[in-house]
Structures are given as structure tokens and as C-alpha cells.
Image (cartoon, helix red, strand yellow):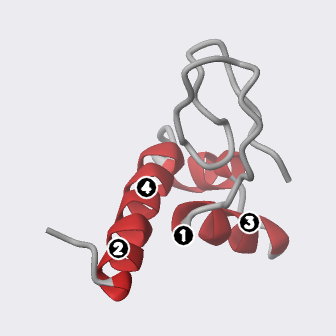
Amino acid sequence: MLCKWNEKLVCDVCGKQANNKDVKRKCTPGLGDRVAAGLKAVGITEERVAKVFRKPCKCAKRRKALNKLGERLTRIKRGIDE
């Protein structure tokens, strides 16, 4: 799957940034994206979370944080962390 660039040239799936919309980059979903897909598969959606807790869901914030964590763990595993 290729990255899907939004108007800010950030991939809507993996969160990577590009210099222009013509960039063809293989999209690799991060840890947060995979957790979100797993939760959605068992019926836990942002709408349901908001309804149960009666306040806005912070799913996007969690997803972004888990994606960053996953990237850092991958870099550590490969031995390229500072």
C-alpha cells in the first residue's frame, strides 16, 4: 500500500511526511495504527468509546503516541538510536 498524502503532505495512515504529493512511498502502518485496527475489528470504535465515557475520545492522540513509540523501538532494535 502506498502512502495517502493529505493537504499538509503527511500520510493519513502512517504519519510520514513528504516534500510533494508526487512521492510514491510504501506505507507501513505503525504500532498505533495496528492497535486501532485490532480494536476496530472487535467493535471498539472512537464513537463507542466517546459514548461510553461521555466525553470526546483521545484515540488520535494515543494512536500518534504509539506510532512514535513503535518507531523508537524499531530504531533501538536496529541499533540506530542515539
Instruction: Give the mark toward the camera: 2 or 1.
Output: 2
Taking 53 as reference, is 57 above or below it?
A: above
Q: Are marks 3 and 2 in contact (CB under 8 Å)?
A: no
N-term mark: 3 or 1 = 1
Residue at the spot 81% in from the left edge and 46% down from the top edge: 2
- The disc placed on residue 31 is 1
Q: Which residue is mark 3?
A: 37
N-term mark: 2 or 1 = 1
Q: Position of residue 17 (x, y in %)?
A: 52, 33
Q: Position of residue 48 (x, y in %)?
A: 69, 53
Seen from the viewer's position, the closer of residues 33 and 82 is 82
N-term mark: 3 or 2 = 3
Label 4 to label 3: alpha-carbon separation: 13 Å
N-term mark: 4 or 2 = 4
Quarter holding residue 37 = bottom right
Label 2 to label 1: alpha-carbon separation: 13 Å
Q: Amino acid at mark 1?
A: Leu
Q: Are marks 1 and 4 in contact (CB under 8 Å)?
A: no
Residue at the spot 22% in from the left edge and 72% down from the top edge: 81
Label 3 to label 1: alpha-carbon separation: 10 Å
N-term mark: 1 or 4 = 1
Q: Amino acid at mark 4?
A: Arg
Q: Position of residue 25 (x, y in %)?
A: 72, 44
Alpha-carbon neighbours of circle 4 within 10 Å: few (<14), some, or many (≥20)?
some
Label 3 to label 2: alpha-carbon separation: 23 Å
Q: Position of residue 65 (x, y in %)?
A: 37, 56
Alpha-carbon neighbours of circle 2 within 10 Å: few (<14), some, or many (≥20)?
few
Taking 62 as reference, is 10 above or below it?
A: above
- The disc placed on residue 70 is none
